[in-house]
Amino acid sequence: MSLAAGCAGPVRFPAEPMASRPAGDGAIQTYDTDGDGRADYVTMQDPRGRTVRIGYDTTGDGEADSFADLDQIAVADCRHVVLIIDGVGYDTVKAFQEGGGLRAFHPPAPVISTFPAMTDVALNDAFQTVRCRGYEAVHFNRKANRLEGGDSDYLAMENEDWVRCTDYRAGVLVDPLAYLFPGHFFKEELTEFRKRFDRRDRPRLVAYFVSTAGLGTRDLIDGQHEVLRAIDHLVEELVWKTRGLVKVTLFSDHGHTLVRGQWIDFREFLREKGWIVRDRLDGPRDVVPIEYGLVTYASYATRDRAALAATLLEHEGVDFATYAERDTVVVASAGGKAVIERRGDRYRYRAESGDPLRLADIIAKAKTQGNVFDADGFADDRAWLGLTAAHAYPDALDRLWRAFHGQTEHVPDVIASLKEGYNAGLGSRAWRFPDGASTHGDLGRKSSTAFIMSTTSPIRTEWQPLRCRDLPHILDDLTGRPWPPARKEDR
């Protein structure tokens, strides 16, 4: 290989290699890192396309003479960077890597998000922090009989206790702008992250990027590809500038529908159906919408849960409605009704009519393959996860149960999960996207399936499939340090 050394130039890693060529069963890329028009850095890929070796020309003799075998560098000898990219789903990342991107990483593993598939609830699980007050910055306090929260709570990060375990998160005033001008603010976030990394003041650096959500919301799959290209370039830069003395783990909180959704004015719809839309509950036909962001679910407080669920199902955009009833969770769709029951750490799905969660075939097949179900039809929680992780509604029983039991301090009475192509929430959010926007929250696979991947090692198959609340022990292993990180005030 012909390389030449330079002595000065930009600190940023070049966006593209000067050349790429096959080498044995792998490939080699050469880069000009100082802008003098000559290559001075090389990366080498194994047969699977993963970068495993890097080399530098330190003498200017035209040959790489100093090498680092990345997998031979111990985790304990490295800084570890943990990057959280909001809203990028497993399928997008998997396809991007299979297309030649993210070569520094081992393959991604899917991670099933919470229901609703929302950032604060999911990252609360991942960081094991204080439970969220509600799914979003607004919740209904049944004891006080009123809506609480809003912009003031959002700005104070009252629902984001997990942020206190991170080292970088843009100021919350950036958040609305990150949806209107996501490309600009993502670049700003990357710049700020680089500054934090270059301080060299901690062995582990945890960063969350909010603008990645804005890019997916506005530009769909193209926006997410922009995110992944930038992250790919950033990681290549970190490996280059540290001579491989960095390990990087990348994960997300949830996926995205990646289709432009039509906003549903549920307030008007419910009024037309005879409900009284209010901000408190006094009568049997009162309903309180619990709204904040633009999402693919809708939640409500009411006294007649079954009646409200039935009304919501009359809208073509509603996939199913769910609510807690005594010791069960009811799931109702236009095609039927089912009940979820829990006994210890075991669940039963009992279809009363139809099959709203489309589990009948999965259950029938599992019954032929061993003792998955007991005599009463209950199966272990992890067994259900294994059976349904790649289903149209991943891990539905546990996620629906937790939505009403212990996931947040305040829970709604009824939740509607929307069909693809629809969204709900505050009208002021929808007006920002007159042509429609991609978003998340529903129980479907695209919205629900996040990912994790690392340069340290593959995600062990015996650990999969994963939920967000499984990530702490995964991150313990990958980073070689206890997870979650200490809160900022305790450092």
Image (tube, grey):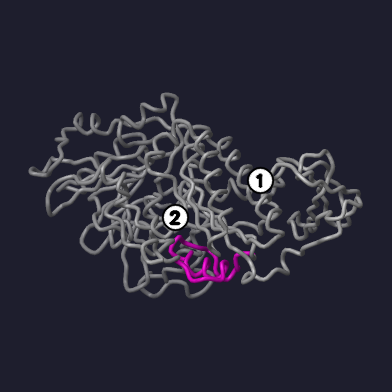
Quarter of the image for residue 407 reads: bottom left
Q: Is residue 109 visible?
A: no
Q: Is residue 53 visible?
A: yes
Considering depth in this image, is 405 or 201 the residue closer to the camera? 201
Q: Are marks 2 and 1 in contact (CB under 8 Å)?
A: no
Q: Residues within 10 Å of mark 2 (few under 14, many from 20)?
A: many
**Element type at mark 1:** helix
Image point (66%, 45%), residue name: 233
Circle on res. 166: none
Q: Position of residue 273 (x, y in %)?
A: 20, 32
Between disc 2 and disc 1, whose residue precedes?
Answer: 2
Q: Position of residue 325 (x, y in %)?
A: 22, 58
Quarter of the image for residue 463 reads: bottom right
Query: What's the CA distance linking mark 2 and mark 1?
Result: 27 Å
The stretch of residues the image draws in magenta is: 458-484
Circle on res. 113: 2
Judge from the rendering whether residue 469 lies leftward or rightward of residue 197; answer left or right: left
Q: Position of residue 395 (x, y in %)?
A: 44, 59
Check disc 1 and give the amino acid type. Answer: His
Q: Residue 475 colored magenta?
A: yes
User: Which residue does the numbered mark 1 point to in the structure image?
Assistant: 233
**Element type at mark 2:** loop
Nearer to us: label 2 or label 1: 1
Q: Residue 259 colored magenta?
A: no
Q: Position of residue 465 (x, y in %)?
A: 53, 63
- Quarter of the image containing the C terminus? bottom left
